[in-house]
Amino acid sequence: MKKIDDGGVGAVVVATGIASVAAQLVFVREYLAQFQGNEIVIALIFFCWLVLGGVGTVAAKGTGLKMVPPNPANLALLSGLLALLSVVQVVAVRGLRDLVFIHGASVGFYGTFGYIAATIAPYALLVGFVLPYALNVARLRLPGYRGNWIYMADNAGDVAGAALFSFVLVYWLTPLQTLLVVHLPLLAAILRLHSAPPRLPIVCLALIALAAGAVFEDRLLPDREGRRLLTAESRYGRLEVVESKGQITLFSDGRPQITSHDPALAEESVHFPLSQIDRPRRVLLVSGIGGMLAEVAKYRPEQVDYVELDPMVAQLQHRFDLLAPADNLTVIAEDGRAYLSGTSNQYDAILVNLPEPETYQVNRFYTAGFFALAKKRLAPEGVLSFAIEGAANYISENRRQKLSSLANAAGSQFAHVVLMPGQRLFFLCSDRPMNTDVPRLLENKGIPTRHIRRYFHGDLTGQRIRQFNEAVDPAIPPNLDLSPRMMRLAFLGWFQRHGESPFWILLLTAAAAFVGAARMTRPQWVLLTTGCTGIGAEMLAIFTFQAIYGYIYLQLGVLVTVFLAGMLPGAWIGGRYTGSRRRALVGADVLLASLLILFALLLTVAPLTLPATALYGFGILISLGCGFQFPIALGLAGDDAAAASRSFSADLMGAALGVLLVSLVLIPLLGMIPACLCLAGLKVASSLVSGSIHGTD
């Protein structure tokens, strides 16, 4: 690429790739912070990005080129506008939510989807437009400039941007500081464009906006109820400490994580399980609830271990007196599952104090796999406790299925699983029988409480306890790591709470895909399946990583990097390939299908011990095959500007379809392994289409 005198267009494309991928990862954090860490938001961001990028790509021909004639000056203007829009989008994401929706209210699927689409549209449309537009500008200088060169330049920038974000920026910079840094190469590339005056005004305007965003970052955050005491950007998410009427609350990605005053919940979380044990000597807390350490101290344990994934969370709890220091307390900055896998400690009680399992990260602590791991670290008659949202009297069908799936998952490991209704619905799991008369147990032990007293019998009656325990349906499948039934129920419950249905989004997506595919040539149809398979495999790797390791935002950029890293060498090999193109497409289809089947086998054999390096290797090989197919199919389509635009569009359309298919349908409904096999089947079908293409030698 260095030997080609393209007037600096290639450098602009590379710099655009660096900036756009890093910006996309910044946008992920912003949307997660606005929608309480729900990973489905990641899928919606990728979907909107791909669809709108595809629309922008299609616009870069015909009428689009007439409205914005291809020349270096317009390319400089569009690229500078891209840098400016990155800051505008972050400000819009943060500031518009409370204007569009009721402050503090839960937002339905379609509201979330619409908000993401509307706010991400300007940047995504422009990114999609710039890539094929740059090809037209390059061909003004070099008529024989190949479309594959632009594809490779863009991919090189994508890999560099994802790697820079993942290995450097996420650890040291805030989101708006990151945007400033990643757009500097783009602004420099604009200044080096040949025959592109005037460039300085747009560069200066973009630089001022980026610098202002970085300087005034804290002032651009949305308001909270109360007084914000501190905001911090952790490598795991956005942390905020807010004081309201004397109560201090620590928020993580917009979700309340721990509060300073919640005595009733603290008592129930501690005394329901610990009252069952004669003398709890070692206690493990997986996350915490405000005031629970004081309740644990009433049992005078010899050792209390507190596990918190994010070390900054523990630091803030100490700083704002949310975590009282004690001689017998050890704070462990590690993922709870990873800690239990590596420690040899035995505990009399393990108390899991996490939110409702409505994200893949939290769901990992409510599966049969986790319960088996916890049991190995419990003393022979130890107790594991966890809780979900309860119900006053009526148990809805969705809630019944949730508690049944959890009870059956725990019951696969423990001889006794008892459901205890309180402020939340507590599950007590042990190989010893449980005594549900907690007030009497506490009286016998001489442990004073304020909330759990004799009058508490009105809430904890035998009838209420039987109501919940008899609601457990043994026929409901247990919640598993790679078949997360709780995520399916949470997803469906999300629609039910807002009177919505997933049918419409799936119908519209299927109809759009059908109409688009019907107008495609066979090489473009192959690219559609390639885009679907590539992004589908990426979403599989993301959610598999989340299920096994549980800190996806930190590793999201790494996974994006490896799924891009193979594209460039694959495209280079495909661009230099001189053999039968038909056989090359068929061979690549078979390779991709084989890789997906192999990945499914690895998940079957080693579902919870799969090393991260296996996911990275899987990503590189998948992207290598996808990158190889693009120049082969593009060459078959003609490699002119119109063919390049249609091929980019087909790839993006397939990727958008893959995001929804895998994230919203296959994984929640079928699980990880069947999702792998479905994608493999898609590539097998694609190989039949590839084999039917004629005139490819």
Image (cartoon, helix red, strand yellow):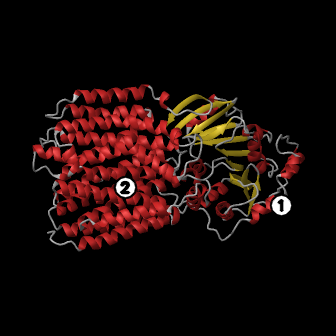
Whole-percent x and y of residue 555? 44, 46
Can residue 433 be seen here? The reply is: no
The CA span between labels 1 and 2 is 53 Å
Q: Is residue 469 above or below residue 137?
A: below
Pick the front one: 113 or 43: 113
Determine which of the numbered discs, if any, sits on residue 193 in the image. Answer: none
Whole-percent x and y of residue 184? 30, 32
Pick the front one: 303 or 108: 108
In the picture provided, is 631 more to the left or to the right than 619? left
Taking the spot 54% from the left edge, 41% from the top edge, the residue there is 253
Q: Quadrant of the C terminus?
A: bottom left
Q: Mark 1 vs mark 2: which is more N-terminal?
A: 1
Say what amino acid the circle numbered 2 marks. Gly
In the picture provided, is 111 more to the left or to the right than 145? right
Residue highlighted by disc 2 = 619
Residue highlighted by disc 1 = 463
